[in-house]
Image (tube, rainbow, N blue to C red):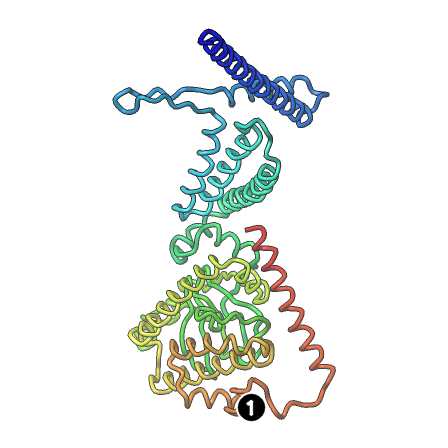
Amino acid sequence: TTTRIVKSKFEIKIAASSATRRQLSTKAQQKRSSTTFRHRDNHRQHQHATPTSHPILRLFLQSLQHTLLKPRSLPLPRYISPQHYSFTLSEVFGHSSFILVAASYATQDFLELRVMAVLGSTSMLFFTYFHPHGRVLWLPLKWNLLFIAINSYRVGKVLFDRFMADGLCEDLKEFREEHLNVVDVVDWYKLVRISEEEVFEEGDLVLQQGRANHFIRIVLEGELEVLRDGTLTYVVEKGNFVSESGLHAGLMLTGSIESCGTIVCGPPFDPTDSQNNNNNNTTTQNHHRRDNRVRCLRWNRDKLMELLENDKGLRNALQAALSWDIVRKLKMQRKMLSEGRVKNPTVWTKKREDQGISRYASILQNIMLRHPEEFGDMSEVLTKYRRIHHVGDEDHERALAKCGWTEEEFRVGKRHDVEDDEDIEDEEFESARWRRVKRYSSKVVRSLLQ
Protein backbone atom coordinates (compact mmCIF):
# COMPACT_ATOMS: atom_id res chain seq x y z
CA THR A 1 0.00 0.00 0.00
CA THR A 2 2.81 2.42 0.83
CA THR A 3 4.53 1.59 -2.47
CA ARG A 4 1.33 2.31 -4.41
CA ILE A 5 0.90 5.66 -2.65
CA VAL A 6 4.50 6.75 -3.40
CA LYS A 7 4.18 5.57 -7.01
CA SER A 8 0.91 7.47 -7.47
CA LYS A 9 2.41 10.69 -6.06
CA PHE A 10 5.42 10.35 -8.38
CA GLU A 11 3.12 9.86 -11.38
CA ILE A 12 1.10 12.92 -10.37
CA LYS A 13 4.30 15.04 -10.26
CA ILE A 14 5.41 13.76 -13.62
CA ALA A 15 2.00 14.53 -15.11
CA ALA A 16 2.01 18.03 -13.61
CA SER A 17 5.52 18.76 -14.89
CA SER A 18 4.64 17.52 -18.36
CA ALA A 19 1.48 19.66 -18.38
CA THR A 20 3.52 22.67 -17.31
CA ARG A 21 6.03 22.03 -20.09
CA ARG A 22 3.24 21.74 -22.61
CA GLN A 23 1.73 25.02 -21.45
CA LEU A 24 5.10 26.79 -21.64
CA SER A 25 5.79 25.39 -25.09
CA THR A 26 2.31 26.43 -26.23
CA LYS A 27 2.84 29.99 -24.96
CA ALA A 28 6.26 30.21 -26.56
CA GLN A 29 4.85 28.94 -29.84
CA GLN A 30 2.00 31.49 -29.68
CA LYS A 31 4.48 34.25 -28.92
CA ARG A 32 6.69 33.25 -31.83
CA SER A 33 3.72 33.02 -34.16
CA SER A 34 2.39 36.44 -33.05
CA THR A 35 5.84 37.96 -33.51
CA THR A 36 6.09 36.35 -36.90
CA PHE A 37 2.67 37.65 -37.92
CA ARG A 38 3.48 41.12 -36.60
CA HIS A 39 6.74 41.32 -38.50
CA ARG A 40 4.96 39.95 -41.55
CA ASP A 41 2.25 42.62 -41.25
CA ASN A 42 4.85 45.33 -40.74
CA HIS A 43 6.79 44.09 -43.71
CA ARG A 44 3.61 44.09 -45.81
CA GLN A 45 2.72 47.57 -44.55
CA HIS A 46 6.13 48.99 -45.37
CA GLN A 47 6.01 47.24 -48.72
CA HIS A 48 2.64 48.90 -49.32
CA ALA A 49 4.01 52.30 -48.19
CA THR A 50 7.14 51.91 -50.29
CA PRO A 51 6.77 51.99 -54.09
CA THR A 52 7.74 48.57 -55.42
CA SER A 53 8.70 50.10 -58.76
CA HIS A 54 11.70 51.87 -57.16
CA PRO A 55 13.98 49.21 -55.69
CA ILE A 56 16.66 51.76 -54.82
CA LEU A 57 14.19 53.79 -52.78
CA ARG A 58 12.86 50.64 -51.12
CA LEU A 59 16.38 49.57 -50.22
CA PHE A 60 17.13 53.01 -48.83
CA LEU A 61 13.99 52.98 -46.65
CA GLN A 62 14.77 49.49 -45.39
CA SER A 63 18.31 50.49 -44.43
CA LEU A 64 16.99 53.67 -42.82
CA GLN A 65 14.40 51.62 -40.91
CA HIS A 66 17.09 49.26 -39.70
CA THR A 67 19.24 52.16 -38.56
CA LEU A 68 16.46 54.05 -36.78
CA LEU A 69 14.89 51.01 -35.08
CA LYS A 70 18.12 49.33 -34.03
CA PRO A 71 18.24 49.12 -30.20
CA ARG A 72 21.16 51.01 -28.70
CA SER A 73 22.34 51.03 -25.11
CA LEU A 74 22.96 54.15 -23.14
CA PRO A 75 26.40 53.90 -21.48
CA LEU A 76 25.86 55.08 -17.93
CA PRO A 77 28.35 54.55 -15.12
CA ARG A 78 27.31 51.99 -12.51
CA TYR A 79 27.50 54.55 -9.70
CA ILE A 80 24.74 56.54 -11.49
CA SER A 81 22.47 53.62 -12.31
CA PRO A 82 23.19 49.86 -12.34
CA GLN A 83 20.46 49.31 -14.93
CA HIS A 84 21.04 49.33 -18.66
CA TYR A 85 18.89 51.72 -20.68
CA SER A 86 18.22 51.15 -24.36
CA PHE A 87 16.86 53.49 -26.97
CA THR A 88 16.40 53.87 -30.71
CA LEU A 89 17.10 56.78 -33.02
CA SER A 90 13.39 56.92 -33.85
CA GLU A 91 12.64 57.65 -30.19
CA VAL A 92 15.34 60.35 -30.25
CA PHE A 93 13.51 62.04 -33.14
CA GLY A 94 10.25 61.86 -31.20
CA HIS A 95 11.77 63.49 -28.11
CA SER A 96 13.52 66.11 -30.26
CA SER A 97 10.20 67.11 -31.81
CA PHE A 98 8.63 67.93 -28.44
CA ILE A 99 11.80 69.68 -27.24
CA LEU A 100 11.79 71.94 -30.32
CA VAL A 101 8.11 72.76 -29.84
CA ALA A 102 8.79 73.69 -26.20
CA ALA A 103 11.77 75.85 -27.22
CA SER A 104 9.68 77.67 -29.84
CA TYR A 105 7.44 78.98 -27.05
CA ALA A 106 10.41 80.85 -25.57
CA THR A 107 11.42 82.73 -28.73
CA GLN A 108 9.95 86.04 -29.88
CA ASP A 109 11.45 86.16 -33.36
CA PHE A 110 8.94 85.20 -36.03
CA LEU A 111 11.47 83.48 -38.30
CA GLU A 112 13.05 81.45 -35.49
CA LEU A 113 9.63 80.25 -34.35
CA ARG A 114 8.69 79.08 -37.84
CA VAL A 115 12.04 77.33 -38.39
CA MET A 116 11.69 75.49 -35.06
CA ALA A 117 8.16 74.47 -36.03
CA VAL A 118 9.41 73.02 -39.33
CA LEU A 119 12.24 71.12 -37.60
CA GLY A 120 9.90 69.80 -34.92
CA SER A 121 7.35 68.57 -37.46
CA THR A 122 10.13 66.99 -39.55
CA SER A 123 11.43 65.11 -36.50
CA MET A 124 7.92 63.90 -35.79
CA LEU A 125 7.70 62.61 -39.39
CA PHE A 126 10.61 60.25 -38.77
CA PHE A 127 9.08 59.11 -35.48
CA THR A 128 5.63 58.41 -36.95
CA TYR A 129 6.88 56.65 -40.10
CA PHE A 130 9.58 54.58 -38.37
CA HIS A 131 7.67 53.97 -35.16
CA PRO A 132 9.29 51.70 -32.55
CA HIS A 133 6.18 49.46 -32.53
CA GLY A 134 6.68 48.82 -36.24
CA ARG A 135 3.49 50.47 -37.52
CA VAL A 136 3.28 53.67 -39.54
CA LEU A 137 1.13 56.28 -37.77
CA TRP A 138 -0.53 57.79 -40.80
CA LEU A 139 -2.82 60.25 -39.01
CA PRO A 140 -0.11 62.35 -37.26
CA LEU A 141 2.18 61.92 -40.29
CA LYS A 142 -0.33 63.60 -42.63
CA TRP A 143 -1.02 66.43 -40.18
CA ASN A 144 2.69 67.10 -39.75
CA LEU A 145 3.11 67.22 -43.53
CA LEU A 146 0.44 69.93 -43.61
CA PHE A 147 2.15 71.87 -40.79
CA ILE A 148 5.49 71.64 -42.58
CA ALA A 149 3.96 73.01 -45.80
CA ILE A 150 2.31 75.98 -44.02
CA ASN A 151 5.37 76.91 -41.95
CA SER A 152 7.71 76.46 -44.91
CA TYR A 153 5.55 78.89 -46.90
CA ARG A 154 5.76 81.43 -44.07
CA VAL A 155 9.52 81.02 -43.77
CA GLY A 156 9.96 81.43 -47.51
CA LYS A 157 7.77 84.54 -47.51
CA VAL A 158 9.81 86.14 -44.73
CA LEU A 159 13.09 85.37 -46.48
CA PHE A 160 11.73 86.70 -49.78
CA ASP A 161 10.54 89.94 -48.13
CA ARG A 162 13.95 90.42 -46.51
CA PHE A 163 15.64 89.83 -49.84
CA MET A 164 13.40 92.40 -51.52
CA ALA A 165 13.94 94.85 -48.65
CA ASP A 166 17.70 94.58 -49.16
CA GLY A 167 17.11 95.63 -52.78
CA LEU A 168 15.77 99.08 -51.83
CA CYS A 169 17.80 102.04 -52.97
CA GLU A 170 20.32 103.46 -50.54
CA ASP A 171 18.57 106.80 -50.00
CA LEU A 172 15.38 105.05 -48.86
CA LYS A 173 17.39 102.84 -46.49
CA GLU A 174 19.16 105.86 -45.04
CA PHE A 175 15.86 107.71 -44.74
CA ARG A 176 14.35 104.85 -42.72
CA GLU A 177 17.36 104.65 -40.41
CA GLU A 178 17.30 108.40 -39.85
CA HIS A 179 13.58 109.12 -39.50
CA LEU A 180 11.67 105.81 -39.21
CA ASN A 181 13.94 103.58 -37.15
CA VAL A 182 10.92 102.23 -35.24
CA VAL A 183 9.71 100.65 -38.50
CA ASP A 184 11.36 97.38 -39.48
CA VAL A 185 13.14 97.26 -42.83
CA VAL A 186 10.68 94.65 -44.16
CA ASP A 187 7.72 96.77 -43.05
CA TRP A 188 9.32 99.78 -44.73
CA TYR A 189 9.63 97.75 -47.93
CA LYS A 190 5.91 96.89 -47.73
CA LEU A 191 5.07 100.57 -47.41
CA VAL A 192 7.34 101.58 -50.29
CA ARG A 193 5.90 98.83 -52.48
CA ILE A 194 2.38 100.32 -52.48
CA SER A 195 3.51 103.95 -52.60
CA GLU A 196 4.11 106.42 -55.41
CA GLU A 197 6.87 109.02 -55.55
CA GLU A 198 6.03 112.67 -56.19
CA VAL A 199 8.31 115.58 -57.01
CA PHE A 200 7.29 119.22 -56.48
CA GLU A 201 9.17 122.26 -57.60
CA GLU A 202 9.10 125.63 -55.92
CA GLY A 203 5.71 127.30 -56.37
CA ASP A 204 3.75 124.08 -56.97
CA LEU A 205 0.43 123.52 -55.22
CA VAL A 206 0.24 120.20 -53.41
CA LEU A 207 -3.21 120.43 -51.86
CA GLN A 208 -5.96 123.05 -51.78
CA GLN A 209 -7.87 123.92 -48.62
CA GLY A 210 -11.39 122.46 -48.61
CA ARG A 211 -10.64 119.91 -51.36
CA ALA A 212 -11.02 116.15 -50.94
CA ASN A 213 -7.72 114.39 -50.28
CA HIS A 214 -7.30 110.65 -50.96
CA PHE A 215 -3.61 110.38 -50.03
CA ILE A 216 -1.23 110.24 -47.09
CA ARG A 217 2.25 111.59 -47.75
CA ILE A 218 5.70 111.63 -46.18
CA VAL A 219 8.40 114.13 -47.15
CA LEU A 220 11.66 112.57 -48.36
CA GLU A 221 13.42 115.81 -49.29
CA GLY A 222 12.75 119.54 -48.93
CA GLU A 223 9.97 121.24 -46.98
CA LEU A 224 6.35 122.19 -47.53
CA GLU A 225 4.37 125.11 -46.15
CA VAL A 226 0.89 124.62 -44.69
CA LEU A 227 -1.45 127.64 -44.88
CA ARG A 228 -4.79 128.28 -43.26
CA ASP A 229 -6.72 131.04 -45.03
CA GLY A 230 -3.43 132.32 -46.44
CA THR A 231 -1.66 132.36 -43.06
CA LEU A 232 1.36 130.12 -42.52
CA THR A 233 0.51 127.74 -39.64
CA TYR A 234 3.33 125.20 -39.74
CA VAL A 235 6.08 123.77 -41.93
CA VAL A 236 6.44 120.12 -42.98
CA GLU A 237 10.08 119.13 -43.38
CA LYS A 238 11.98 115.96 -44.19
CA GLY A 239 10.61 112.94 -42.34
CA ASN A 240 7.18 114.47 -41.55
CA PHE A 241 3.85 112.90 -42.52
CA VAL A 242 1.12 114.87 -44.25
CA SER A 243 -2.66 114.29 -43.96
CA GLU A 244 -2.45 111.31 -41.59
CA SER A 245 -5.84 112.39 -40.10
CA GLY A 246 -5.82 110.59 -36.76
CA LEU A 247 -3.97 107.47 -37.88
CA HIS A 248 -1.59 107.87 -34.94
CA ALA A 249 -4.57 107.48 -32.59
CA GLY A 250 -5.84 104.37 -34.39
CA LEU A 251 -8.44 105.92 -36.73
CA MET A 252 -8.40 103.66 -39.79
CA LEU A 253 -10.23 106.00 -42.16
CA THR A 254 -10.70 105.13 -45.81
CA GLY A 255 -11.80 107.24 -48.74
CA SER A 256 -11.23 110.97 -49.03
CA ILE A 257 -10.93 113.52 -46.22
CA GLU A 258 -11.45 117.23 -46.64
CA SER A 259 -8.21 119.17 -46.40
CA CYS A 260 -8.04 121.62 -43.50
CA GLY A 261 -5.31 123.73 -45.12
CA THR A 262 -3.45 124.57 -48.28
CA ILE A 263 -0.08 122.90 -48.84
CA VAL A 264 2.41 124.55 -51.16
CA CYS A 265 6.03 124.12 -52.09
CA GLY A 266 7.29 127.54 -51.06
CA PRO A 267 10.75 129.07 -51.25
CA PRO A 268 13.32 127.89 -48.71
CA PHE A 269 13.38 129.97 -45.56
CA ASP A 270 16.50 132.04 -44.88
CA PRO A 271 16.69 133.67 -41.42
CA THR A 272 18.92 136.44 -42.84
CA ASP A 273 16.30 137.58 -45.39
CA SER A 274 14.81 140.19 -43.08
CA GLN A 275 18.22 141.68 -42.36
CA ASN A 276 19.12 141.65 -46.03
CA ASN A 277 15.85 143.36 -46.91
CA ASN A 278 16.64 146.12 -44.48
CA ASN A 279 20.08 146.50 -46.05
CA ASN A 280 18.70 146.34 -49.63
CA ASN A 281 20.90 143.38 -50.54
CA THR A 282 18.17 141.03 -51.73
CA THR A 283 19.43 140.90 -55.30
CA THR A 284 22.64 139.14 -54.36
CA GLN A 285 20.86 136.77 -51.99
CA ASN A 286 18.26 135.79 -54.59
CA HIS A 287 21.04 135.13 -57.06
CA HIS A 288 22.71 132.61 -54.76
CA ARG A 289 19.49 131.20 -53.25
CA ARG A 290 18.86 127.51 -53.90
CA ASP A 291 15.48 126.30 -55.13
CA ASN A 292 13.20 124.23 -52.91
CA ARG A 293 12.70 120.83 -54.50
CA VAL A 294 10.43 118.43 -52.59
CA ARG A 295 10.23 114.66 -52.96
CA CYS A 296 7.38 112.77 -51.32
CA LEU A 297 6.02 109.26 -51.06
CA ARG A 298 2.25 109.11 -51.20
CA TRP A 299 -0.11 106.28 -50.32
CA ASN A 300 -3.67 105.80 -51.42
CA ARG A 301 -5.62 105.79 -48.18
CA ASP A 302 -7.71 102.73 -49.08
CA LYS A 303 -4.67 100.61 -50.02
CA LEU A 304 -2.73 101.71 -46.96
CA MET A 305 -5.59 100.91 -44.58
CA GLU A 306 -6.03 97.50 -46.18
CA LEU A 307 -2.32 96.78 -45.67
CA LEU A 308 -2.44 97.95 -42.04
CA GLU A 309 -5.49 95.82 -41.29
CA ASN A 310 -3.73 92.76 -42.70
CA ASP A 311 -0.48 93.40 -40.81
CA LYS A 312 -0.95 94.30 -37.15
CA GLY A 313 2.78 94.57 -36.49
CA LEU A 314 3.21 97.11 -39.26
CA ARG A 315 0.23 99.08 -37.96
CA ASN A 316 1.71 99.32 -34.46
CA ALA A 317 5.10 100.37 -35.82
CA LEU A 318 3.58 103.03 -38.08
CA GLN A 319 1.49 104.42 -35.23
CA ALA A 320 4.64 104.72 -33.12
CA ALA A 321 6.38 106.57 -35.97
CA LEU A 322 3.39 108.91 -36.32
CA SER A 323 3.48 109.66 -32.59
CA TRP A 324 7.11 110.75 -32.88
CA ASP A 325 6.14 112.78 -35.94
CA ILE A 326 3.65 114.81 -33.89
CA VAL A 327 6.40 115.62 -31.39
CA ARG A 328 8.64 116.82 -34.22
CA LYS A 329 5.89 119.02 -35.62
CA LEU A 330 5.34 120.63 -32.22
CA LYS A 331 9.07 121.34 -31.96
CA MET A 332 8.97 122.78 -35.48
CA GLN A 333 6.27 125.27 -34.42
CA ARG A 334 8.46 126.44 -31.56
CA LYS A 335 11.32 126.79 -34.04
CA MET A 336 9.12 128.91 -36.30
CA LEU A 337 8.49 131.32 -33.43
CA SER A 338 12.18 131.55 -32.55
CA GLU A 339 13.25 132.12 -36.18
CA GLY A 340 10.70 134.87 -36.75
CA ARG A 341 8.66 133.07 -39.40
CA VAL A 342 5.47 133.96 -37.51
CA LYS A 343 4.62 137.61 -38.14
CA ASN A 344 1.61 137.88 -35.86
CA PRO A 345 1.52 135.27 -33.04
CA THR A 346 -2.09 136.11 -32.12
CA VAL A 347 -3.43 135.54 -35.63
CA TRP A 348 -1.16 132.49 -35.99
CA THR A 349 -2.58 130.91 -32.83
CA LYS A 350 -6.15 131.61 -33.94
CA LYS A 351 -5.56 130.03 -37.36
CA ARG A 352 -3.96 126.97 -35.77
CA GLU A 353 -7.02 126.49 -33.57
CA ASP A 354 -9.35 126.85 -36.55
CA GLN A 355 -7.23 124.37 -38.47
CA GLY A 356 -7.42 121.82 -35.64
CA ILE A 357 -11.21 122.13 -35.41
CA SER A 358 -11.52 121.85 -39.20
CA ARG A 359 -9.33 118.72 -39.15
CA TYR A 360 -11.49 117.18 -36.43
CA ALA A 361 -14.66 118.06 -38.37
CA SER A 362 -13.24 116.38 -41.49
CA ILE A 363 -12.56 113.24 -39.47
CA LEU A 364 -16.13 113.27 -38.10
CA GLN A 365 -17.54 113.75 -41.57
CA ASN A 366 -15.55 110.81 -42.92
CA ILE A 367 -16.66 108.55 -40.07
CA MET A 368 -20.36 109.44 -40.29
CA LEU A 369 -20.55 109.16 -44.07
CA ARG A 370 -18.22 106.26 -44.88
CA HIS A 371 -18.14 104.25 -41.65
CA PRO A 372 -21.63 104.54 -40.10
CA GLU A 373 -21.74 100.83 -39.28
CA GLU A 374 -18.42 101.12 -37.39
CA PHE A 375 -19.27 104.31 -35.53
CA GLY A 376 -19.69 102.47 -32.24
CA ASP A 377 -16.28 100.81 -32.57
CA MET A 378 -14.60 104.10 -33.51
CA SER A 379 -16.12 106.13 -30.68
CA GLU A 380 -13.44 104.97 -28.24
CA VAL A 381 -10.63 105.77 -30.70
CA LEU A 382 -12.25 109.13 -31.40
CA THR A 383 -12.24 109.88 -27.67
CA LYS A 384 -8.55 109.03 -27.61
CA TYR A 385 -7.93 111.46 -30.49
CA ARG A 386 -9.78 114.22 -28.63
CA ARG A 387 -7.68 113.57 -25.53
CA ILE A 388 -4.41 113.73 -27.47
CA HIS A 389 -5.25 116.95 -29.31
CA HIS A 390 -7.15 118.62 -26.44
CA VAL A 391 -10.45 118.84 -28.31
CA GLY A 392 -12.89 120.03 -25.65
CA ASP A 393 -16.67 119.92 -25.62
CA GLU A 394 -16.96 123.40 -27.12
CA ASP A 395 -14.58 122.51 -29.95
CA HIS A 396 -16.50 119.27 -30.44
CA GLU A 397 -19.79 121.17 -30.75
CA ARG A 398 -18.19 123.64 -33.18
CA ALA A 399 -16.97 120.76 -35.32
CA LEU A 400 -20.44 119.19 -35.30
CA ALA A 401 -21.98 122.52 -36.29
CA LYS A 402 -19.48 122.79 -39.14
CA CYS A 403 -20.64 119.37 -40.37
CA GLY A 404 -24.29 120.33 -39.91
CA TRP A 405 -25.07 117.84 -37.11
CA THR A 406 -26.48 118.09 -33.63
CA GLU A 407 -25.19 116.42 -30.49
CA GLU A 408 -28.18 114.06 -30.46
CA GLU A 409 -27.52 112.98 -34.06
CA PHE A 410 -23.87 112.38 -33.19
CA ARG A 411 -24.79 110.12 -30.24
CA VAL A 412 -27.29 108.20 -32.36
CA GLY A 413 -24.84 107.98 -35.27
CA LYS A 414 -27.37 109.05 -37.90
CA ARG A 415 -28.67 112.33 -39.26
CA HIS A 416 -32.42 113.02 -39.17
CA ASP A 417 -32.57 115.46 -42.06
CA VAL A 418 -30.94 113.30 -44.72
CA GLU A 419 -32.39 113.72 -48.19
CA ASP A 420 -34.62 110.88 -49.36
CA ASP A 421 -32.45 109.40 -52.04
CA GLU A 422 -32.93 105.65 -51.83
CA ASP A 423 -30.45 104.85 -54.59
CA ILE A 424 -27.61 106.65 -52.82
CA GLU A 425 -28.51 105.06 -49.50
CA ASP A 426 -28.65 101.59 -51.02
CA GLU A 427 -25.30 102.14 -52.72
CA GLU A 428 -23.71 103.35 -49.49
CA PHE A 429 -25.17 100.35 -47.61
CA GLU A 430 -24.05 97.83 -50.19
CA SER A 431 -20.53 99.23 -50.42
CA ALA A 432 -20.17 99.29 -46.62
CA ARG A 433 -21.56 95.78 -46.30
CA TRP A 434 -19.26 94.32 -48.94
CA ARG A 435 -16.28 96.09 -47.41
CA ARG A 436 -17.01 94.32 -44.13
CA VAL A 437 -17.51 90.95 -45.87
CA LYS A 438 -14.18 91.35 -47.68
CA ARG A 439 -12.38 92.41 -44.50
CA TYR A 440 -13.63 89.52 -42.37
CA SER A 441 -13.16 86.89 -45.09
CA SER A 442 -9.55 88.01 -45.57
CA LYS A 443 -9.01 87.76 -41.81
CA VAL A 444 -10.23 84.13 -41.86
CA VAL A 445 -7.80 83.26 -44.66
CA ARG A 446 -4.91 85.00 -42.89
CA SER A 447 -5.66 83.17 -39.64
CA LEU A 448 -5.46 79.84 -41.47
CA LEU A 449 -2.11 80.73 -43.06
CA GLN A 450 -0.63 82.20 -39.90
Task: Using the image as rendered, state which of residue 9 and residue 43 is in the foreground.
Answer: 9
Percent coordinates x, y for residue 298 in the rendering: 54, 63
Q: Residue furthest top?
A: 3
**Residue 82 visible in the snapshot:** yes
Q: Is residue 331 above or below residue 44?
A: below
| Residue that appears at 35% across and 76% down | 341
Q: Left or right: where does residue 122 sit relative to residue 85?
A: right
Q: Residue furthest front?
A: 1
Q: Which residue is mark 1?
A: 404
Q: Quadrant of residue 367?
A: bottom right
Q: Left or right: where does residue 49 sit relative to residue 374?
A: right
| Residue that appears at 59% across and 86% down | 414
> Of helix, strand and loop, which one carries label 1?
loop
Percent coordinates x, y for residue 243 in the rendering: 49, 71
Percent coordinates x, y for residue 344 in the rendering: 35, 85
| Residue that appears at 48% across and 53% down | 187
Q: Amino acid at mark 1?
A: Gly
Q: Is residue 78 above or below residue 382?
A: above
| Residue that appears at 64% across and 73% down | 432
